[in-house]
Each structure stands twice: as structure tokens, then as C-alpha cells.
Image: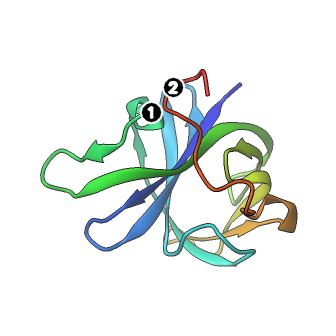
Amino acid sequence: MPRFVVLTHDHPTLHWDFMLEKEAVLRTWRLAQPPTDAGPIAAEAITDHRLEYLDYEGPVSGNRGTVVAFDRGEYSLLEDVGCVVEVELRGGRLQGRAVLKRVSETGHWEFRLTPDALPTAGRERPPPLGRGG
């Protein structure tokens, strides 16, 4: 089952990296806000990242700030048609559907969570590092 991670990243400004495992890389979108409401949240497609970020927290090389896990878990791909990516998330905080929709040809996307995927009081911490959590 493929995994996902949402990392809080403080460089160059505070943002959240939403990453989906796809083969040997992590497809990555930079979110302007934390994924804590139904949105839409402005997102930007950025370069693929290394799989190591699935389990990493700490300083980023090249003095590019620090990352801390907001959430992590597994996901199922429901749709990927180029301009729309829909997934079912099974994380510590996010459990339900998330939709990324491209809104321009310049890399601008919108990120939305369905109401069932919104974090709740019983889901406040990401699972531990590694596959066992």
C-alpha cells in the first residue's frame, strides 16, 4: 500500500508539503495552509522528493529549514487524470478523501478535504515513524 506524509516546513516561509509515494519518488505539492478544514487550500506542484521524507523529521540540507510531520499514513489512489488527483487517506489525523485539482497551467492547484477527512479531536498526532505505526 503506498504511503503519504504531510510535513510542516518552515522555509522559505511556513507551508505544508503534501507528499504521495509513487514508485521511487514522492509526488509533492506545497500547501499554503495546514490541511485542517475543507478548503480550498492554495497548492503548488513542486519537484518530486526522495522517499526518505516519508519517515524523516529534522533539518533540511542546504540550510532550508526544518520539517516536522503533521500526518502520515497510507493512501489509495482513486483518480489521477493529470489535472485531478483524488486519494483516500488513512493517516493519524487525516482519514478520508483528499482532492487536488489543477486550476492553471502554471502549477497552481487547489487542495480539498472531504468533511470525513478533516482532523478531529481523537486524531491529533501523526503515527510514529516507520511502517509499523
For disc 2, the neighbor class at 10 Å (few under 14, some 14 to 19, many from 20) is few
Q: Residue at x 79, y 59 (%)?
A: 117
Q: Residue furthest front?
A: 122
Residue shown at 38%/37% (left/top)?
Answer: 56
Provide residue 80's location: percent of width, then percent of height: 74, 47
Q: Nearer the viewer, residue 27 or 130?
A: 130
Q: Quadrant of the N terminus?
A: top right
Q: Position of residue 58 (x, y in %)?
A: 28, 45
In this view, 48 is above or below 131: below
Count residues near mark 1 (Cα–Cα under 10 Å), then give few for <14, some for 14-19, many for 20+. some
Q: Can you say which quadrant of the picture contains the C terminus? A: top right
Residue type at numbered disc 1: Asp
What label does residue 7 carry, if any?
A: none
Q: Secondary structure at mark 2?
A: loop
Residue 97 placement (x, y as % from top left): 81, 55
Q: How is the image coloured?
A: rainbow
The amino acid at mark 2 is Gly
Circle 1 SS class:
loop
Reading the chain from its start, which is encountered first: label 2 or label 1? 1
Cβ–Cβ under 8 Å for marks 2 and 1 = yes
Q: Nearer the viewer, residue 118 or 79?
A: 118
- Residue 101: x percent and y percent? 70, 66
| In this picture, residue 19 sits left or right of residue 50 | right
Residue under label 1, please give it: 55
Q: Which mark is residue 130?
A: 2
Q: CA distance from mark 2 to mark 1?
A: 6 Å
Question: Which residue is most to the top?
Answer: 132
- Seen in the picture, residue 77 relative to 66 is either above or below; the reply is above
On the rendered structure, is 35 left or right of 121? left
Which residue is depicted at the point 39% across and 51% down?
A: 68
Q: Is residue 10 left or right of residue 74?
A: left
